[in-house]
Amino acid sequence: MHGSVERALGVHRVLEPAGALPQAARRLDADPVVGPDEVRIAVRRLTLDAASFRQLAESCGGDGEAVRAAVLDIIATRGKMQNPVTGSGGMLIGVVDAVGPESPLGLAVGDRVATLVSLTLTPLLIADGLARWDGRSEQVPAEGTAILFGRSIAAVLPDDLPDAVSLAVLDVCGAPAATARVVERAGARSVTVLGAAGKSGSLSLAAARRAGASNLTGLVRNAAEAAALAAAGLADRVVIADATDPLAVAAAVGTPADVTIVCVDVPGAEHGAVLATVDGGIVVFFSMATSFSAAALGAEGMAADVTMLVGNGYTPGHAALALELYRSDHGVRALIDPRVTT
Ligand code: NAP
């Protein structure tokens, strides 16, 4: 029998290895029958984490059918959507359809919600074979069930935005919240964002501005993204470089920034981020494609005195801040909307 703290963390749903928490587990029990402290969601749509989707698409040579089969296989095997290569997941939206009598989440049957905990720890059962998905987009129309634990978090979906937009914004809502917190606490003036024209990148630039930074650089990988970012007006300066080429990043950025936020969805951006940051500055690795060893050993090897933070997906108030930035900043909308299929 598991105690109430263990149950709230979802330990009772771990099939293997024994003793692991759900996020680290190889396999979860996705049985749709809810326990007394659980909530069941009728799933409507998943969003796959950008790093995970890119890895799957590249490893399947862009074959959508193969990507769909790979995602179905991962979920069936693991009882959750956790890409075994990137280790990352994503999140989902759906409708609450069962609430255990002891659930502390305050949700009611019929609530339309987005889960703000990762798919990597959410028991998930797919019932429709993902038949309405062509395997070519991060967002996945889906029918099935997901389980929330006592310590999970979920947000009721706003009525004024398309669900697909809310899903895309909430998936990366940890990035603007982390950016705002770091800029405010450090009193940072200059901020560089790598992958600045993407979803988390655009929100992070807007959050940095709101938090008081006055010198914002957005690094993008090509002229098309540079034009889009410049038109959005979120950065004071737009530079083009491959974020995985450290010397090119350093040359493009020029004077290092107080804070660098890594929002690309590819591996290999660690060293460029360190070089782009002033001595005594801060790097926030929001990207799930980040290597802890590459970041730590790379900084050591460059004798770079930077503080490196892992972008925790959770910060109090993160969902409300991201949705508010999306609603109020036309530049954020201009960059996010084309990436979302509604
Ligand atoms: P996104 O919208 O796809 O944005 C990523 C951006 O990076 C795109 O503009 C992309 O350009 C650009 N990029 C890719 N390779 C690049 C390179 N070599 N040089 C420069 N730019 C490059 O992704 P997102 O949804 O914002 O997610 C960004 C990262 O956040 C992902 O790694 C994801 O895993 C991570 N994430 C973290 C959390 C957390 O809790 N920490 C939660 C969700 C997501 P193209 O579009 O041209 O490829």
Image (tube, rainbow, N blue to C red):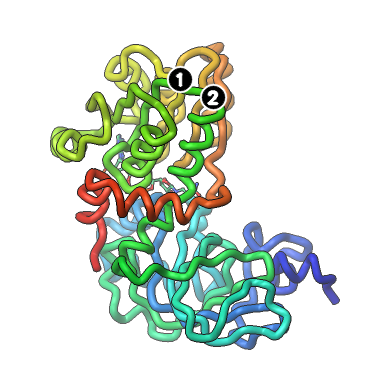
- Decide if residue 22 is on the left or right side of residue 196: right
Position of residue 169 measured from the top left corner of the image (x, y, whole percent):
37, 56
- Decide if residue 42 is on the left or right side of residue 27: left
The nearer-to-camera label among 2 and 1 is: 2
Three-letter amino acid code at the position of disc 2: Ala
Q: Which residue is drawn at 39% across and 68% down?
A: 158
Q: 101 and 301: which one is in front?
A: 101
**Residue with the mark numbered 1:** 258
Q: Residue at x 23, y 56 (%)?
A: 337
Q: Residue at x 61, y 79 (%)?
A: 39
Mark 2 touches mark 1? (CB < 8 Å): yes
Quadrant (top left/top right/bottom left/bottom right) for the N terminus: bottom right
**Residue with the mark numbered 2:** 186
Q: 4 and 267: which one is in front?
A: 4
Q: Which residue is drawn at 37% across and 72% down?
A: 69
Position of residue 61 measured from the top left corner of the image (x, y, whole percent):
27, 56
**Compared with residue 294, is residue 143 higher up or lower down, i.e. above or below?**
below
**Compared with residue 340, is residue 15 higher up or lower down, i.e. above or below?**
below
Position of residue 54 measured from the top left corner of the image (x, y, whole percent):
34, 52
Q: Judging from the image, what secondary structure is the residue with disc 2 in?
A: helix
Residue 268 found in image quarter = top left
Quadrant (top left/top right/bottom left/bottom right) for the C terminus: bottom left
- Does residue 223 appear in this view? yes
Q: Residues within 10 Å of mark 2 (few under 14, many from 20)?
A: few
**Compared with residue 334, is residue 13 higher up or lower down, i.e. above or below?**
below
Three-letter amino acid code at the position of disc 1: Asp
- Does residue 66 appear in this view? no
Q: Judging from the image, what secondary structure is the residue with disc 1 in?
A: strand
Quick one: label 2 or label 1, which is nearer the N terminus? 2
